[in-house]
Amino acid sequence: MNSKERVRTALLRKSLPDRVPVQFDLCRSLLEAFGEKYRIPVDYTVSYYEDVTYRISANDLRTAMGSDCAIVGASLPSGYRHRATEDGCFYNEFGMKMKPGPLYMDVVECPFAKNASDNAVRDFPFPDPLADGRYDKAKRDIEKFGKTHFVISDVELTIFEMAWHMVGLEKFLTDMAMKESYVGILLDKIKEFSIGVCKRMAELGVDGIWTGDDVGTQKGMMISPKMWRSLFKPRLAEIFQEIKATNRNVTVMYHSDGAVAPILDDLADIGLEVLNPVQPNVPGHDPAELKSGHGSRLSFWGAIDQQELLPRGTPEEIEKEVAKRIGILGAGGGYLCAPAHIVQADVSMENVEAFIAAVKKHGVYPLKG
């Protein structure tokens, strides 16, 4: 099998691939270090939300390192330039003032922080998801990797995260609880932007579309399941339906960090096919329970601990944990092995390579357990 066939077979769960497929994202410092080691220049694709940039960049490098997937995403329009400020920040397409940090960007000013009203939201000039040039780099990578690798389009910050970044987290959570009328207007405008991106990517022929919003914490959900079902479930259902209506062969994927077990059945009910990142060591995410409780409806992507194991574990400990996770989540197919987050700067190159090698060693079917 080539990588494309391997991932598709694993995620569809109708038959077994030759081995469990592997995928990983790397932070900028690791991309640069591995780029130098492999002598492959790191090609960055700047996302419309800047911190997603590292997920949709460096496909030449990551596939050379062993990833079975290539990740693409919508970028900035042709000729667009961020409006820079004298204090070293800039405003992005969504009106957020962004401050470059040592690893990622910080949102230091939200466009609706002081004026979150129905009219302000309606009148706000949202970006055009189909702007000229937004998909130029995605098209290039789809053409380059589409026959050999499983190509995923990243459309994270699908609704909830984009909304609170535009308002401010505390205020937005409070306003949702208070049922402020602008909330629904804002969520719908963001939903329409995401639908535009998803449909265009589906038309371009990606294999999977990776939606997502972090609604979980280390101990539970950030908002109640009841609120999630009221505000987000129907909007996500519409997005999933639009994806399948555009290209029924596209696999629907969804990302949320944290403990989101209470809504997994809801997500499956509205058409989710693959759950990411399956964050380990949080309530409700025991691998055996996830596999037995949801494995007939969902495939899993992730599950390798990024908080303790990868930064602090030895290569031997990483191999042992990878083998364990593969033995459980990979049984019968339905597993794309990956770290549960972008691999951070506190992870050594040796440990990244140990992870990749462990998947290829222990993921061969039939699994040895």
Image (cartoon, helix red, strand yellow):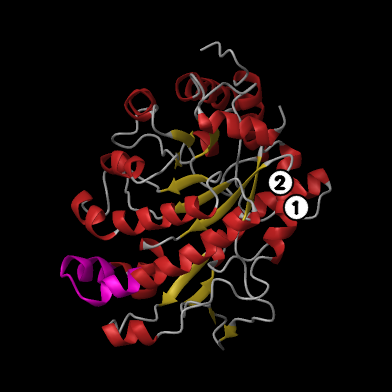
Against 202, residue 368 (above or below) is: above
Q: Nearer the viewer, residue 62 or 233?
A: 233
Q: Residues within 10 Å of mark 1 (few under 14, many from 20)?
A: some
> Bounds of the magenta span?
170-187
Secondary structure beneath dot 1 equals: helix
Left/right placement of residue 50 relative to residue 238 reads right
The residue under the point 38% across, 25% down is 291
Q: Can residue 13 be seen in this snapshot?
A: yes
Q: Main secondary structure of the magenta part?
A: helix
Q: What is the number of the mark on residue 177? A: none
Give the number of marks: 2
Disc 1 from disc 2: Cα separation: 6 Å
Q: Residue 101, image x and y in percent?
A: 54, 67
- Residue 209's x, y, as percent? 53, 50
236 or 170: nearer the viewer:
236
Instruction: Tell me, yes or no, whether the highlighted magenta stretch contains residue 208.
Output: no
Circle 1/circle 2 CB separation < 8 Å? yes
In this rendering, position of residue 4 left or right of residue 155:
right
For the N terminus, give its image quadrant.
top right
Q: Could you tell me if residue 313 is visible in this image?
A: no
Residue 183 at what x, y percent from top left? Answer: 27, 72
Q: Amino acid at mark 2?
A: Gly
Residue 283: quadrant of the picture: top left
Amino acid of disc 1: Glu
Q: Is residue 304 above or below residue 96?
A: above
Q: Which mark is residue 146?
A: 2
Residue 65 x, y percent position in the rendering: 73, 38
Q: Look at the picture and state if 79 lies above or below 206.
A: below
Reading the image, the residue beneath label 1 is 143
**Relative to 245, is 25 on the left or the right?**
right
Mark 2 lies on a secondary structure that is loop
Q: Nearer the viewer, residue 144 or 310?
A: 144
